[in-house]
């Protein structure tokens, strides 16, 4: 039985929650391996819509064990609020497991995130202001606070004191902000211990045993390939690795145990926050995509920037992730366009470039080269098989598959759980 990675193949918001939920009933574990509560998923079950931020989408699938891996940064207040909200709606959250090695987002992380963005002014990155970047920075600087630390007051206090020795200097002298009291932070974090204790486990051991025993484990990435801190449009990226390699480090399962890597592609392209976006539409088509697609961030509430499908990015995602399959989402949003442009290459300094340029300067100056495909007007939300789609919709999917470099094994034709065409099984 397979271990699968499911990740975003664009700038995030591709519909990973729907794809994970589709597989959730067939898998034993669903694992978030990176990111924090800056990575929202929307899942529609029947007439119910669920907005998930930290929790894996598998939490909505009975029989599936959801896991927050060591590569995630956890805001305990957000996590407990999210659990409470699901419990109130009748969702069983008791099977959740949290890695004791996951790092915490503390009050000083969110404070520093917000004041730093304001200080940068026009040079700001466009973060969510939720403390994710500063928490990851502390992890790399070896002054982070881990989930397991809240169960030992002595260790917790030592680590908070060490972190705030420097941070209070920065807050007071650079940003003219009041210093943060060690006692206040320690008291708040200790207050979460009893509420979280029953969820915390050695998730690396559990997941490796599950794979070895033939159980199905699904690793769920947040954000998307082009937001990866190593492989994305740096510096306009997240602070972790949403790419396939991040599943290994963020969950503690070796690469030889992963059988399949599934990339989620939206039938057009969106991104939130600052940074280059070659196919961005600043016209009526862009506004139409935003309105019909409901393109507003699940976590941030910000409008997403919208543009036509970018095959250059899709090919890049195939390459850096080793993708075996694509799940194409939101095909229904394109219904009604007479002609649909697709970016097949870039023009940079008068030259045609068919692969993503490694140079930040070149990518900022990339102009899309389009091929135009015929559109369709028929409603496709009731389609159950590929043959049910209008011929032009079929041709559009086939063209995207050919350009992107991996087979499209499923197609989303609506937001609902059952509004999906399965072409090839992922399991």
Image (cartoon, helix red, strand yellow):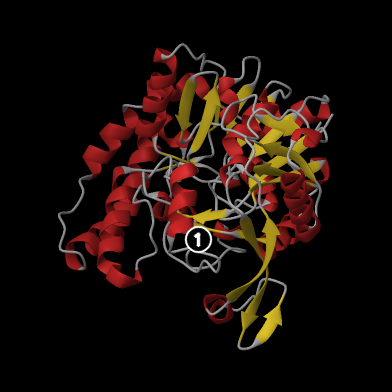
Residue tagged 1: 237
Q: Residue at x 61, y 83 (%)?
A: 348
- Percent x, y for residue 252? 68, 41
SS class of the residue under badge 1?
Answer: loop
Name the residue furthest bottom.
350
Q: Is residue 418 left or right of residue 118?
A: right
State whether residue 34 is above or below residue 363: above
Q: Going 48% across and 34% down the picture, which residue do you hit?
A: 148
Give the x, y percent position of residue 214. 83, 25
Q: Can residue 366 be seen in this snapshot? A: yes
Q: Residue 381's quadrant in the figure?
A: top right
* Number of numbered discs visible in the structure rendering: 1
Q: Characterize the local packing of mark 1: few (<14), some (14-19) or many (20 or more) Cα atoms within 10 angstroms.
A: many
Q: Is 20 positioned to the left or the right of 389 in the image?
A: left
Q: Nearer the viewer, residue 126 or 22?
A: 22
* Viewer-closest of 366 and 32: 366
Rendered location of residue 169, percent (x, y): 23, 62
């Amino acid at each position: 039985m397979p271990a699968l990675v499911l990740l975003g193949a664009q700038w995030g918001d591709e519909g990973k929650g729907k794809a994970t939920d589709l597989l959730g009933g067939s898998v034993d574990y669903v694992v978030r391996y990176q990111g924090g509560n800056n990575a929202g998923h929307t899942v529609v079950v029947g007439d119910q819509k669920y907005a998930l931020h930290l929790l894996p989408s598998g939490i909505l699938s009975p029989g599936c064990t959801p896991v927050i891996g060591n590569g995630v940064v956890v805001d305990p207040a957000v996590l407990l609020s999210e659990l409470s909200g699901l419990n109130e709606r009748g969702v069983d959250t008791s099977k959740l497991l949290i890695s004791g090695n996951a790092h915490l987002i503390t009050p000083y992380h969110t404070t520093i995130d917000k004041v730093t963005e304001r200080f940068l002014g026009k040079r700001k990155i466009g973060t969510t202001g939720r403390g994710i970047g500063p928490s990851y920075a502390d992890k790399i600087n070896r002054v982070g606070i881990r989930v397991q630390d809240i169960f030992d007051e002595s260790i917790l206090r030592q680590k908070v004191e060490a972190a705030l020795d420097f941070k209070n200097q920065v807050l007071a002298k650079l940003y003219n902000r009041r210093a943060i009291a060690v006692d206040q932070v320690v008291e708040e974090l200790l207050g979460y211990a009893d509420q979280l204790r029953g969820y915390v486990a050695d998730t690396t051991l559990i997941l490796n045993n599950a794979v070895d025993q033939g159980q199905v484990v699904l690793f769920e990435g947040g954000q998307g390939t082009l937001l990866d801190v190593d492989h994305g449009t740096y510096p306009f990226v997240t602070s972790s690795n949403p790419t396939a390699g991040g599943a290994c480090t963020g969950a503690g399962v070796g690469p030889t145990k992963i059988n399949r890597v599934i990339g989620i592609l939206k039938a057009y392209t969106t991104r939130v926050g600052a940074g280059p976006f070659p196919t961005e539409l600043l016209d009526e088509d862009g506004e139409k995509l935003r309105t019909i697609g409901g393109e507003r961030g699940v976590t941030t509430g910000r409008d997403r920037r919208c543009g036509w499908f970018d095959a250059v990015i899709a090919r890049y995602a195939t390459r850096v992730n080793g993708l075996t399959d694509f799940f194409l989402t939101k095909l229904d949003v394109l219904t009604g366009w007479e002609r649909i442009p697709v970016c097949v290459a870039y023009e940079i300094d008068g030259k045609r470039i068919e692969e993503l340029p490694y140079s930040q300067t070149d990518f900022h100056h990339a102009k899309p080269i389009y091929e135009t495909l015929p559109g369709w007007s028929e409603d496709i939300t009731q389609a159950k098989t590929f043959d049910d789609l209008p011929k032009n919709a079929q041709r559009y999917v086939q063209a995207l598959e050919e350009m992107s470099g991996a087979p499209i094994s499923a197609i989303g034709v609506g937001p609902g759980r059952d509004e999906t065409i399965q072409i090839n099984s992922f399991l």
